[in-house]
Image: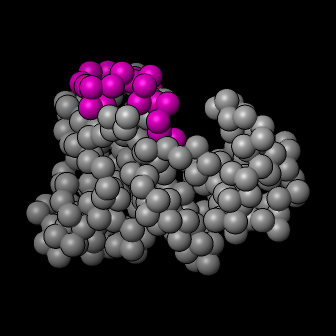
Amino acid sequence: MKRQSILPLTIEKLCFDIDGRRLLHDLNFSLKAGARSVILGPNGAGKSLTLRLCHGLAAPTSGEIRWNGHSAAQARARQAMVFQRPVMLRRSVSANIDYVLACQGVKRRERGARIADALDRTGLTAHAAVPARVLSVGEQQRLALARVWVLRPEVLFLDEPTASLDPAATRAVEDIISSIHAAGTKVVLTTQNLGQARRLADDVLFMFNGRLLEQAPADIFFKAPRTSEARAFIEGEF
């Protein structure tokens, strides 16, 4: 029997405070299956913090995070997150992938084929025996994506995954992200990069100073943003 989806993800009146200062103000939005959702906005808008709260790495000060009737623990088991600078284990590329499969209880006899497939899909087959920590930054990000791809998450959160990459490495990572989405995973990505948002987004959430100012289909957002802040951001004013 098919499992019930953990989506939509529903956020209601979400706030986050630290040291008496409010960083997120009454966020309200819903993320449905299918569309690639890009959280866009300038530095300090609250994008990464919002992603961490959704993934369960921090607890909100107030408000609700709901996963279609599932508990937070149930939802966490069916999602994954990749950071701007992912941690590489002190072992080979293939062993990094093997480790996450072993942690998920995948039997050893099944792991080899899944590792080979992930390496092939991310262009890392030739690097299988190379220590992960000697890879280039772009290659490490591709390995981070390979590690989550083998887990087949229903939702993948990506926190500015190409912020420190050159254009060629950026496009390689974007191609992998698009392939993961095409395979059925819901992608939620934060970025300050307008070009990347235009290439990847089906749905845009625009944040500014800890507030969600707009959520709209990407074509509508870029053609006719509703707020002056979004218009200024699109025009490169900040």
Question: Residue at 37% across / 38% down in the picture?
Answer: 2
The answer to whether residue 61 is visible is yes
- Magenta range is 58-80
Quadrant in which the N terminus appears:
top left
Question: Residue at 53% across / 71% down in the picture?
Answer: 175
Q: Is residue 44 magenta?
A: no
Locate residue 21 relative to residue 12 in the image: left or right: right
Q: Is residue 70 magenta?
A: yes
Note whether 53 is above or below 231 in the view shown: above
Question: Residue at 44% across / 22% down in the picture?
Answer: 73
Quadrant in which the C terminus appears:
bottom left
Note whether 119 is above or below 209 in the view shown: below
Q: How many marks?
A: 0
Residue 147 % position (x, y): 65, 48
The one of 173 and 4 positioned closer to us in this rendering:
4
Residue 231 % position (x, y): 20, 69
Residue 68 % position (x, y): 26, 32
Question: Residue at 27% across / 71% down in the picture?
Answer: 234
